[in-house]
């Protein structure tokens, strides 16, 4: 049976002496990395919730505007076409579909805004509805800007280190922006 030389025994004991602390340090570093990634993920999910809240504001503003457009259409007896477009907004299932339907409604109500072509009595009834429609459009603009800002902040964040690593770990991806 071969025995270790005294130098080999000292070397083996030295390795055993450092093995425990090295394992402890490795576990500690792994724990710190895990905590760091978890904190970043929580922050990213909070930004996604902010995007959702901003979208709810855009969605409500689109709905209000669609209702006001329908009121104007009723007054101007242009209901069937506008009703179809408002219905398209109501039945949209994704933000992208809702945004596209809203753009189509934009184009359709443009001619209805021109009250100059109506006689004086009609103008008095139409102008308050038109004004509330314009107010709703301004609200959409503000809400859309808030949404776009939230999306841009999030998309920028997930492209930069260390958030890109944290987003990669859980599979978070870019969010579409509200186009116009």
Image (spheres, grey):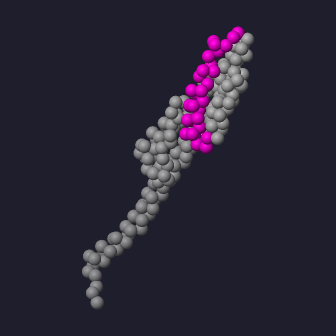
In-front residue for pair 43/72: 72
Q: Does residue 170 lie above or below 23 as drawn? A: above
Q: Could you say where residue 30 lies in the image, as x and y percent from the top left?
A: 45, 58
Q: Residue furthest bottom?
A: 1
Q: Residue furthest top?
A: 120
Q: Does residue 110 lie above or below 27 as drawn? A: above
Residue positioned 51% across, 49% down in the render: 41
Q: Could you say where residue 55 lies in the image, as x and y percent from the top left?
A: 59, 37
For the record, the magenta segment spans 92-120
Residue 160: which quarter of the image?
A: top left
Q: Is residue 176 magenta?
A: no
**Whether residue 50 can be seen here:** no
| Magenta segment main secondary structure | helix
Is residue 27 rendered to the left or right of residue 9? right
Q: Is residue 105 magenta?
A: yes
Q: Quadrant of the N terminus?
A: bottom left
């Amino acid at each position: 049976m071969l025995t270790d030389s005294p130098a080999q025994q000292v070397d083996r004991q030295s390795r055993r002496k450092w093995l425990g602390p090295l394992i402890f340090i490795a576990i500690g570093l792994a724990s710190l990395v895990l905590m760091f990634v978890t904190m970043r993920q929580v922050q990213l999910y909070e930004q996604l919730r902010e995007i959702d809240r901003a979208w709810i504001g855009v969605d409500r503003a689109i709905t209000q505007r669609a209702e006001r457009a329908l009121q104007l259409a009723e007054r101007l007896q242009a209901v069937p076409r506008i009703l179809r477009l408002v219905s398209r907004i109501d039945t949209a299932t994704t933000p992208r579909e809702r945004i596209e339907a809203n753009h189509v409604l934009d184009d359709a109500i443009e001619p209805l805004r021109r009250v100059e072509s109506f006689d004086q009595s009609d103008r008095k009834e139409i102008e308050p509805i038109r004004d509330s429609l314009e107010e709703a459009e301004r609200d959409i603009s503000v809400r859309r800007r808030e949404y776009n800002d939230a999306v841009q902040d999030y998309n920028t964040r997930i492209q930069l280190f260390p958030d890109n690593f944290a987003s990669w770990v859980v599979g978070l991806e870019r969010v579409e922006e509200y186009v116009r």
